[in-house]
Amino acid sequence: MGVKLNSEPSIEISGLKFNYPEINGHPPPGSKPLIEDFSLTLNAGDRCLLVGSNGAGKTTILKILGGKHMVEPHMVRVLGRSAFHDTTLTGSGDLSYLGGEWRRDVAFAGFDVPIQMDVSADKFINGVAGIDPQRRSELIKVLNIDLSWRLHKVSDGQRRRVQICMGLLKPYKVLLLDEITVDLDVLARADLLKFLKKECEERGATIIYATHIFDGLEDWPSHIAYVANGKLQLAMPMEKVREISKLSLMVSQIFFFCNRMIGFGFGLQRTVKSWLRNEREDERKRRKERKVKGLPEFEQPNEGSNDVRSVNNGWAAGRLNSTIAGEENFIFSSNRVLRQ
Ligand SMILES: Nc1ncnc2c1ncn2[C@@H]1O[C@H](COP(=O)(O)OP(=O)(O)OP(=O)(O)O)[C@@H](O)[C@H]1O
């Protein structure tokens, strides 16, 4: 799949393990890894949707890929390099990460700029040096930005568009998107998705997009990856998903795998919903079984593997690896917390 401009994969995740460390820099002793046995390979031109329920680990995976958390270099390679250890990846703009939570600042070219200050969109966008003027104009058009906007007076969605524009100014090779379209109106979202698809098809960019919003995405991804409880449940080209989905219509009980994809006909949203519903049912069953066994209904954080210290990682506190800034001080998944 994808535009094979380079035989080397753009993204290679092999046997990724990760756990968030505590204040002492280590994960709780004996705790189960949050991300485990995670492997995924994507090539130039691939557009991968990353789906999963709240708390599944999508943001964590994207942050690891964006070099914000340290993992062993062989576990995660972006453009053949370790995102955490090779700071030129983000510095050069080859790797761009746009986070989903509302953030007040934009980090661009190493500077933190408050995006709600009294400054015009023009100054903000045109103030970045070394950008191809044609690309800049195209982005301003795609995101329908009025350069005279004063950023402290515009709406959340308008401010968000300026933020996204800043994040896309450099012609990245790998783009990590963590639900960036929540504030956008339908038209702005559709135009942005179209632009991003073109970037993959024409320039061979690789995009991973974590989202819960499937409207208008039917024809967008080339691949889909479904994550649950930090584990990759499946990852495959969309054609294959469609094939299996069709097949599952004809033969209703093919095998477990297909059951996870059944919708009545292919519908991305329906398909993902059925995965999540199955996951929730499995979880309920597990909880029931635990109760019967006299165990606490919810798994305790330190149940599971014996030694996670060896697989951890550490935390890259304060590193400015993302195009849009913001280190989070919360421990819930990003979509579980209220925005500031
Ligand atoms: N800094 C942190 N320290 C400890 N645990 C964390 C931290 N950040 C997230 N977690 C935990 O990691 C798990 C996965 O969170 P993550 O944000 O990756 O999920 P997600 O799939 O992106 O969810 P959502 O769809 O809600 O955005 C959650 O259980 C969350 O509580």
Image: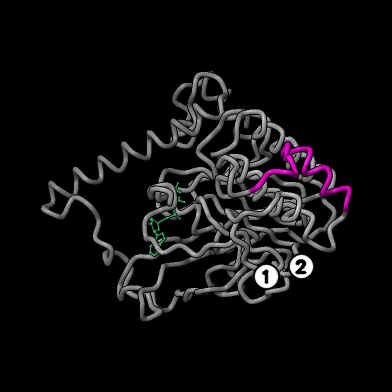
The residue furthest bottom is 24
Above or below, 320 against 265 in this view is: below
Specify few, some or many for label 1: CA neighbours under 10 Å numbering under 14, 14-19, or 20 or more: some
User: How far across and down, in percent of the image, does residue 66 sit?
Assistant: 61, 63
Which span of residues is magenta-colored?
133-150
Ligand 1: quadrant of the figure: bottom left
Residue named by callout 2: 92
Residue drawn 68% across and 74% down?
87
Quick check: is the Cβ at mark 1 less than 8 Å away from ligand 1?
A: no
Residue drawn 76% across and 39% down?
195
Amino acid carrying mark 2 in the image: Ser
The quarter in which the N terminus is drawn is top right
Q: Is residue 142 magenta?
A: yes
User: How far across and down, in percent of the image, does residue 209 sit?
Assistant: 60, 46
Disc number placed over residue 110 in the picture, else none: 1
Q: Secondary structure at mark 1?
A: loop
The reply to whether dot 2 and dot 1 touch (C-beta < 8 Å) is no
In the rendered image, is residue 239 in sight?
no
Specify few, some or many for label 2: CA neighbours under 10 Å numbering under 14, 14-19, or 20 or more: few
**Which is more N-terminal, label 1 or label 2?**
2
